[in-house]
Image (spheres, coloured by chain):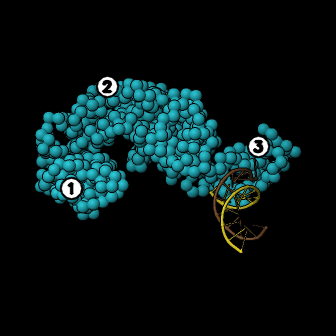
Chain colours: A cyan, B yellow, C brown
DNA sequence: CGGACAAGCTGA
DNA sequence: CAGCTTGTCCGG
């Protein structure tokens, strides 16, 4: 390195490069570290520096740099403690390119929540940890095989415990384990502790992980420092909570894969229904067809084409389940009382006076409300003046009322917002709610999807994968077929691949159909896409021009879609385009298109 | 980001 | 032309 050190013994002033913790400032600046304390400063450290008349936080990105000529260096104002390790600084640079963001936004995620003056001593690893063995688990053989493969996807049925993959990873040393939810993290942490493995729960135990322990956390833990990282595991890689919703829309699975690659350690993904992205990346390992199938519940498909339309969403198979003593969860992804109404007299569809959209009846009110413009009006037919409406597409509230009348006992309604104050407790035998219900209910005997077509036929390119993911989540509530777990699927398209995948316990039904469709329609992962929106979107797309290989689609609703043959082409084009002033959202790998 | 400074707008 | 707003630049 460049040094002008006069004598090796004398403490010397050092020059460090600092990236300010201000995502809007994409530039680094050089500062002096006084001779006293120069030995302690290291790459990744958190510092405070003077910048343009104010103090900002930042990270040391390099030490002993050659400052540009002609600038007067100011001293670092304060060293505030430890920050992301050098490998994470480099990873943040890569992620900034990959998701069209700023390195500082990733480094914020990689930073400890509170100041860490120094790292604790690394805990000692005891002897070989015992395998945790629960009901049905991945055989240890597959787990070991996956780690040996170094880039593998372990497909495990919903009721099959993926913990042996984690156990196999920690046998190799300190692992990084990413889970989709906080309660999955808590479960893995508890079992690793029981097995005597030194564990750091991210973000609370940031320093312990940096010192050297197995780190377990949700998405953000993809950015946790891990001392002596030996393996990376992503649980439920298909789960959308691994992707950040706000831009930069980074995906923990993809960060984990890149991180493992750079560190030269194995990376294993687990999922009951691996994404096409995962399948295209690593070697697929699964149990025998019969073992995997046993981990999916019994699936009753109710072909709605054959049901009496007057029975609405309550055909005989569902009524039988509701009238049994089984604990039943009914899922309907429509809130409110009714989402589509028509006049009981003349049959005219109820629409908004102002904007003509179909109006709905909210759960709480005896009025009609336009979901598009918010206009509200009394329940009166604009065509004939009658005040009685028929619910043509019922919402959760209305269905709950009907089911309660049917079973003659309290039925709880659950929504994403939680239980309604005046409603029966969720401890009731029958529960009705949106898909958020699946997060709030621990166990059930039957999960019934009252209108699965809403998921199967949703106008989103990932609808099929998302529908199977939903069925997998429901399957966890009821357990595998051995335990008697059942799903009841009401659909007009019983031969849809997502329905068949659940019936057969074979996710390749969806993967194969989807792979073919994406090839045909040029959707990811066959291509790489980004969605550009916000007031400054037009200006940005204009500045982007027509880069070779990139298709610009739109605008539609003020949003543009960019499509390229691969991420390198897409991300290079995005990186080469300066951002205009004004609000702009660039979402690489958008989920909902 | 937020301060500095310059170029544009208003009022007498 | 002072006094103010609005915009662009740049920081070590």
- Which badge, 3 or 1, is on the more N-terminal residue? 3
**The disc numbered 2 marks a residue on which chain?**
A
Labels 2, 1: one chain = yes
**The disc numbered 3 marks a residue on which chain?**
A
- Which badge, 2 or 1, is on the more N-terminal residue? 2
Label annotation for residue A436? none
**The disc numbered 1 marks a residue on which chain?**
A
Q: Is residue A437 left or right of residue A261?
A: left
| Residue A300 screen position, x and y as percent | 19, 36
Secondary structure, mark 3, is: loop
Between disc 3 and disc 1, the foreground one is: 1
| Residue A43 screen position, x and y as percent | 68, 45
Q: How far apart are labels 3 and 2 at the CA level?
A: 57 Å
Secondary structure, mark 1, is: loop
User: How many numbered tags mark residues here?
Assistant: 3
Quarter assignment of residue A458: top left
Q: Are marks 3 and 2 in contact (CB under 8 Å)?
A: no
Q: Is residue A450 left or right of residue A229?
A: left
Relative to A528, say whether A220 is above or below.
Answer: below
Name the foreground residue: B12 vs A32. B12
The residue under label 3 is A65
Between disc 3 and disc 2, the foreground one is: 3
* Residue depicted at 74% across the width and 49% down the height: A30
Label annotation for residue A288? 2
Labels 3, 1: one chain = yes
Q: Residues within 10 Å of mark 3 (few under 14, many from 20)?
A: some
Relative to A313, say whether A263 is above or below.
Answer: above
The residue under label 1 is A381
| Residue A408 screen position, x and y as percent | 12, 55
Q: Is residue A408 left or right of residue A6?
A: left
- Which badge, 3 or 2, is on the more N-terminal residue? 3
């Amino acid at each position: 390195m460049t040094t002008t050190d006069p004598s090796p013994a004398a403490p010397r002033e050092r020059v460090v490069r600092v990236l300010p913790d201000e995502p809007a400032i994409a530039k680094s600046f050089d500062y002096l570290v006084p001779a006293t304390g120069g030995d302690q400063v290291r790459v990744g450290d958190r510092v405070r520096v003077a910048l343009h008349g104010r103090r900002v936080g930042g990270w040391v990105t390099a030490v002993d740099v050659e400052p540009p000529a002609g600038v007067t260096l100011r001293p670092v104002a304060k060293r505030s403690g430890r920050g992301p390790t050098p490998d994470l600084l480099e990873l943040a640079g890569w992620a900034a390119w990959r998701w069209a963001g700023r390195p500082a936004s990733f480094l914020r995620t990689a930073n400890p929540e509170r100041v860490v003056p120094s790292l604790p001593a690394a805990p000692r690893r005891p002897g070989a940890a015992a395998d945790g063995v629960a009901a049905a688990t991945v055989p240890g053989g597959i787990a070991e095989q996956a780690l040996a493969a170094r880039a593998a996807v372990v497909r495990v049925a919903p009721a099959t415990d993926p913990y042996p993959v984690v156990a196999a990873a920690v046998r190799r040393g300190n692992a990084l384990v990413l889970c989709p939810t906080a309660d999955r993290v808590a479960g893995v942490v508890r079992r690793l502790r029981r097995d005597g493995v030194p564990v750091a729960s991210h973000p609370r135990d940031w320093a312990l992980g940096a010192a050297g322990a197995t780190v377990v956390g949700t998405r953000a833990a993809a950015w946790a420092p891990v001392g002596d990282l030996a393996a990376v595991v992503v649980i439920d890689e298909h789960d959308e909570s691994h992707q950040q919703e706000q831009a930069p829309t980074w995906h923990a699975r993809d960060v984990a894969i890149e991180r493992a690659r750079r560190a030269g350690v194995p990376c294993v993904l687990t999922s009951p229904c691996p994404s096409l992205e995962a399948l295209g990346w690593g070697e697929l390992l699964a149990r025998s067809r019969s073992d995997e199938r046993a981990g999916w519940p019994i699936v009753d498909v109710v072909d709605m084409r054959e049901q009496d339309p007057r029975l609405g969403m309550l055909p005989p198979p569902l009524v039988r389940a509701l009238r049994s003593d089984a604990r039943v969860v009914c899922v309907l992804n429509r809130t409110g009382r009714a989402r589509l109404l028509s006049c009981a007299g003349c049959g005219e569809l109820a629409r908004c006076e102002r904007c003509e959209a179909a109006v709905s009846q909210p759960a709480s009110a005896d009025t009609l409300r336009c979901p598009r413009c918010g206009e509200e009006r009394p329940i009166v037919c604009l065509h004939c003046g009658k005040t009685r409406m028929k619910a043509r597409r019922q919402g959760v509230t209305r269905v709950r009322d009907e089911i309660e009348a049917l079973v003659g006992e309290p039925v709880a309604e659950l929504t994403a917002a939680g239980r309604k104050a005046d409603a029966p407790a969720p401890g009731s035998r029958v529960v009705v709610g949106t898909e958020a219900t699946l997060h709030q209910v621990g166990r059930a005997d039957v999960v019934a999807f009252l209108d699965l077509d809403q998921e199967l036929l949703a106008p989103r390119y990932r609808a099929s994968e998302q529908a199977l993911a939903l069925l997998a989540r429901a399957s966890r509530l009821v357990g595998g077929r051995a335990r008697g777990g059942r799903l009841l699927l009401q659909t007009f398209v019983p031969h849809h691949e997502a329905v068949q995948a659940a019936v057969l316990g074979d996710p390749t039904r969806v993967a194969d159909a989807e792979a073919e469709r994406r090839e045909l329609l040029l959707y990811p992962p066959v291509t790489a896409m980004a969605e550009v929106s916000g007031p400054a979107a037009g200006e940005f797309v204009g500045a982007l021009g027509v880069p070779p290989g990139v298709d610009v689609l739109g605008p539609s609703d003020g949003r543009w879609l960019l499509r390229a043959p691969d991420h390198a082409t897409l991300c290079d084009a995005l990186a080469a385009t300066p951002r205009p002033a004004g609000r702009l959202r660039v979402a690489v790998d958008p989920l909902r298109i």
